[in-house]
Amino acid sequence: MPQYEDYVKWRRTFHQFPELSDNEYETTKRLKRILESYEIKILDLPLETGLIAEVGQGDTFVAVRSDIDALPINEEVMHEFTSTNEGIMHACGHDIHMASILAVATRLKEIEDQLKGRVRFIFQPAEELGHGAVKLAETGALDGVKAVLGYHNYPTLNIGDFAVKPGAVTSSVDRFEFKIKGKGAHAAKPEQGNDPIIVLGQLINSVQTIVSRNLSAFDNAVVTIGEVSCGNTWNVIADQAYVQGTVRSFDEQVRSFIEQRLSAIGKGLSEVFGVEIETTYFRLPGAVMNDEKLTDDAVNVAKQVGYNVNLMEQPLTIGEDFSGFSSQYPSVFVFIGSNSAYDLHHPKYDPDERILEKVPDYFVTFVQKLLNES
Ligand SMILES: [Zn+2]
Ligand SMILES: [Zn+2]
C-alpha cells in the first residue's frame, strides 16, 4: 500500500507537469494510471478531462473532491520538481489536493470489503475558471450522494491546523458590466448630443448606494467598480461609456438582491437620461455553504485524527467553485494548513508537503463515519 513517501512523489510529479483549466489531459491520464494500478474503478462518464473513481459497494455513497488544474503563472521556486511547463504552475496547490485524495482512494481500496457503502473520488477540472464542479455535477454521478467532502490547503495556517465554520466559508465572485450608449457631439454643443459621462457619474454613485443604503447592517457584501472608460479628448462629447466591477456576497438572497438593484439602476438611469444602458450580470462561483451537521462531524473527525481545530469567525472573501457541489448536495469544505510564506496564486507559493501526512487520515475516518451511520 502506498505510504507518505509515495504521496510526496505523486505530488511532485503533478507539480512538475501542471496543466491549465480544461486542458488537464496528461494529468487525467496520470491519475488514471495510478488509480488503475491499484485496481480502483473509474466511472464511465463523458468527460474530456477529470474523472470520478469509486470504491466500495451498496446504495449509500459519499464523495470526496480534489481539483486538478494549475494557473498561468511562471514559477519562481527552485526545487528538483519545479514546473517544466513554461508559464504554468500549480500555484493553488491542486497538486497537493490530488496526491492526498489519491492517498484516500488507495487506503479505502485496501479496506473496501469492510465499507458500508461506496465512496466516489471526484477529480474535477477547471476550478480556477469556476465551472469544473458544475460540469461534474451535470454528469449526474453525484445524484443521491449523502455528502460531498472537500478541502483547500491554506498557506497562512500551520501544518496540523484545521479551520472550518458552518454556513458560508467563501464568497460568491460575480462580475457586472454596464454599456452606456449616448450620442456624441461637439463639446460646445451639448444640446445636440446625449453625454454618457454625465450618466456614468450618476451610475457610479448609484451603484455605491446598494451596500450603503439598501442592505441591512447585518448583511455583508462588497460592490466594487474596477474599470470605467469613456471619451478620448477634451473637446468632444463621447458617444458611449463602459463600466465593470465585481460583487462579493455570502448569501444567495443578498446576491440576487444586488443583481436586481444593478439592473434597476441601469434601467432607471436609461429612462432618466434617455440613453441606452445594457446591464449584464455574470454569475461566477457562488459562496461555498457548509452543512451544519457535516460541519460538526468535520470538527469531531479533525480532532479525532489530531488536528488543531479553529472555528472561523467569518468566511474568506476568495471564490471557490466547490459551491457547484455545496449548492446541490449536503457538503462540507475545510481549510488545512500548508504553511507557505507566500500565498495561493503567488509565483513563490511553496507549501509544506507534510500536509500530506494527516489529510488522508481525516477523509478516511470521515467517510467511514458517514457510511457507518447510514
Ligand atoms: Zn486558485
Ligand atoms: Zn485552489
Image (cartoon, rainbow, N blue to C red):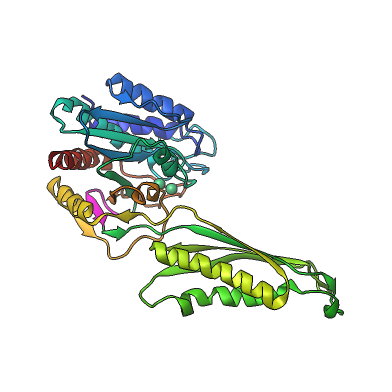
Question: Which image quarter: residue 188?
Answer: bottom right
The residue sitting at 57% across, 61% down in the picture is 176
Question: Which image quarter: residue 286?
Answer: bottom left
Q: Is residue 203 left or right of residue 137?
A: right
**Residue in front for this viewpoint, 271 or 46:** 271
What are the residue bounds of the magenta stretch?
157-164
Q: Is residue 310 left or right of residue 320?
A: left
Q: Looking at the image, is 56 positioned above or below residue 243? A: above
- Identify the image quadrant of the C terminus: top left
Q: Is residue 121 magenta?
A: no
- Identify the image quadrant of the N terminus: top left
The residue sitting at 42% across, 29% down in the picture is 28
Q: Can you give x and y, in whole percent of width and height, for residue 247 in the image?
A: 49, 63
Q: Is residue 182 left or right of residue 137?
A: right
Q: Is residue 295 visible?
A: yes
Q: Is residue 161 magenta?
A: yes
Q: Can you give x and y, in whole percent of width and height, for residue 72 in the image?
A: 53, 43
